Amino acid sequence: MNKSGKLMRITAVNSAKDSPKPAVLLDFDDTAAEQNVAELLLTQFGDPTWQDVRSRFRAGEINLMEYQEIAFRNIQADRTAMRDHVRNNANLRPYFNDLRIFCQENSIPFAIVSQGLDFYIEALLEKEGHTQVPVYAVNTSFSNEGISYEYRHTRPGQENQGNSKGLVVEQHQAQGYHVFYAGDGMSDFEAATRVDVLYAHRTLATECERTNIPFHPFTDFQHMLHAVQEYHATGISTK
Ligand SMILES: [Mg+2]
């Protein structure tokens, strides 16, 4: 027993040094943010037909990229008004700050991966003092003609699907990172099948249960923080 116990301890120490470094990727709406911030904005500023557009998306008639562009097309507000609404009505999920600070202090990559729009994600991050967090999202620009959209993270050959969260995960893994990921929706599923440690709730959790993909449930980021700390210290992942 002693012999094997000692062996295990040595293995753990070695693996902390030799194993891949962790990276933390978080979905935004209903994950990093406690609210669905896109829907918060559409409820306040959107054309009343946006819920019909959402129904068409949920029925599979249009994809997420089309839903978002159509729903935001007729919005009756400028960028500043929408950013102010986000700052006044949304918040980050508990332990987000602790997780971010731990990653920052230990040079662990930490990023938002979202199919949402950059301006509302950045508004909430800035409100809570996180101006340096990388955001992989839809890049927007505002003009008198409305919002235009740029997709910089599409999977080659699947540009009409918009950004691919799975692609961003793969890019981190290709750089040698052990990816911790949290998400809530079907747009996270492609990423969920690829990540090393998965945190899921809501629709994503249901889909992972149905397809036998292991995950940790979450309501805040405390468990994820401890798991990243443990992995960083020992190289052992509680998958
Ligand atoms: Mg989400």
Image (cartoon, rainbow, N blue to C red):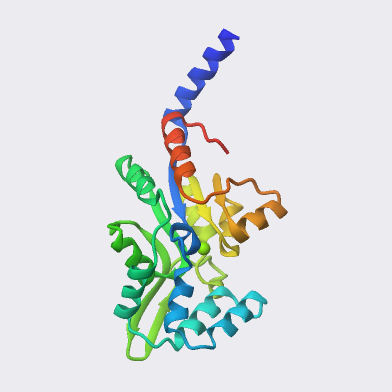
Residue 104 is drawn in which quadrant?
top left
Q: Image point 51% across, 52% down: which residue? A: 182
The quadrant in which residue 33 appears is bottom left
Q: Where the C terminus falls, by quadrant?
A: top right
In the image, farthest residue toward the front: 89
Towards the viewer: 189 or 174: 189
Residue at horizontal 44%, vertical 48%?
24
Side of 194 where 163 appears, left or right: left
Between 218 and 138, the residue placed more toward the observer is 218
Can residue 195 be seen?
no
Residue 49 position, x and y percent, is: 54, 88
Question: Within the image, what quadrant is residue 40 found in?
Answer: bottom left
Position above or below: 199 against 45: above
* Front-most of residues 25 and 52: 52
Residue 220 in sight here: yes
Residue at left offset 40%, top offset 58%: 92
Q: Residue at x 58, y 51 (%)?
A: 194
Q: Is residue 13 above or below residue 102?
A: above
Residue at the bottom extreme, as displayed: 145
Q: How many marks?
A: 0
Instruction: Estimate the x, y position of residue 5 in percent, counting from the top left.
Output: 55, 14
Quick one: which residue is furthest to the top in this view? 2
| Quadrant (top left/top right/bottom left/bottom right) for the N terminus | top right
Instruction: Identify whether 123 is placed above or below 109.
Output: below
Q: Position of residue 156 (x, y in %)?
A: 53, 67
Q: Is residue 134 above or below residue 7?
A: below
Question: x, y (%) of residue 210?
Answer: 72, 54
